[in-house]
Amino acid sequence: MKSFALRKAHWVALSAIMTLLFCTVFFGCTQVGQTAAQAPTGTYTLPKHETNKLKREINAIMQRKLSALKQKDYDLYLSTVTQNDVYYWNEQARWYSEMVKPVISDLSFEVTNITPLDETSLEAEIHQRHTGNGEQFDFRYPLLFQLEGDSWKDCGYHFELLEKPDYTLKYMPGETRVDDFAAMIDTAYQNLEPVFAEKADDHFEIKLFWDQEMLRQRTIPSVSWLFTGWGEPNESLKLYTGQPDIRSYQGTIQHELVHHITIKICQNNLSDWLLEGTAVYYGNAYYDYSLSNALAHMKLRNMAQSIDQLNQTDMINPSTQQEVWDWYNTGFSYVTYLIETYGHDQFMELFYEAGKKPFNDSVTNENFKQDNIATMSAALETVFGMTPEQISENYLVWLETADFDTAG
């Protein structure tokens, strides 16, 4: 089964980009996986000739990565990556798929410096150049390598770490808001503790970048604009920390925890509008609507849409910014209707019902979106005894008297 067996959920295909790309811009949307042990942070002195030998070995690995990307050899590329960090493995599988896209060209790697950390760990400074979407990039970053057996393996950006009981916070050296973000993450965990029977993964991993360009380059470099956050199922939550109003991150973090928990339950088998609506309901809407771009632009008259309309909305090429906000807000409104009418427990049965099916991986399933629409329809009939059309009719009646925190 090739290397896919090691990465249960790798969202890179169109449907996943739709779910995550827009919520990244408007909510900062992201999701999660599993973490490795903290890397050594000290230095370890070696004779110059040994350091030079290590530098040549690491450069050979980087050139192997480059050859794999040029040859589009997925297995060869991932042979350079540690298998001890499932988060990073999944992220590198996606990064591989990013770097072989036509918008990326003229890629090169150069190892400019090696800093041994101990007998089995080192930091390598990587000088990377490439062209992306017609723009030329030239930058450097530290990669952690660890010796596994007799081979050095890429273990990812060399972050500093803060270990917490429930999660691991990784951050770029020089980050000044670590305590603030840890406090917001703690609050999100506390808020969601009584909501869901299922919990987040042990040591849910969150990565903080004060450099927004580095976030893009180490996450999804094919995107032509800078974003606030990104993530996918079984990956870490990755955030740019430099937005001036730090309060806006609280809803984003809680939104992403909701995604992480609920996508695990439904095995990624529900329509994207319901997943997003649920994350808005239990995440962003927990806080003041003004802190969420979509909720701050809620217009009730634009939320009178059927489930079929939500399923058919083209979120890749929306006609206006308001259309995107309307899609999120309508999903949120449907979730509000279902929970207020049937209660949280029955609403969650949708997720457990859909979760009876195997995980739906958008990378390997060309019919990902249509299959999820079909699963969603069947789950609605099983849990609520109604078709999507009947639920849409009832929702539209409910919406006429709905009381949201908006004047729209």
Image: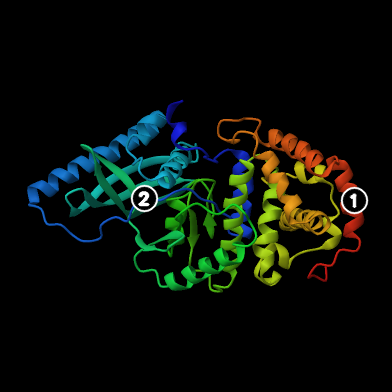
Crowding at label 2, few (<14), some or many (≥20) Cα neighbours within 10 Å?
some
Measuring from the top left, give residue 401's x and y in whole percent.
90, 64
* Left or right position of 396 against 241: right
Above or below 216: residue 73: above
- Residue type at the position of mark 1: Asn
Quickly name the residue at label 1: 394
Res. 58 image quadrant: top left
- At a point 61% along the width and 40% down the height, the residue shown is 267
Instruction: Count every numbered label the image shows and give the total.
Output: 2
Q: How is the image coloured?
A: rainbow
Task: Give the secondary structure at mark 2.
Answer: loop
- At a point 72% along the width and 46% down the height, the residue shown is 349
* Left or right position of 22 against 180: right
Separation (CA) of disc 2 from disc 1? 48 Å
Residue at the outermost top position: 1
Measuring from the top left, give residue 282's x and y in whole percent.
67, 61
Measuring from the top left, give residue 246's x and y in whole percent.
54, 72
- At a point 44% along the width and 48% down the height, the residue shown is 34
* Left or right position of 24 against 317: left
Question: Are circles 2 and 1 on residues that touch, CB within 8 Å?
Answer: no
Measuring from the top left, give residue 299's x and y in whole percent.
81, 63
Res. 325 image quadrant: bottom right
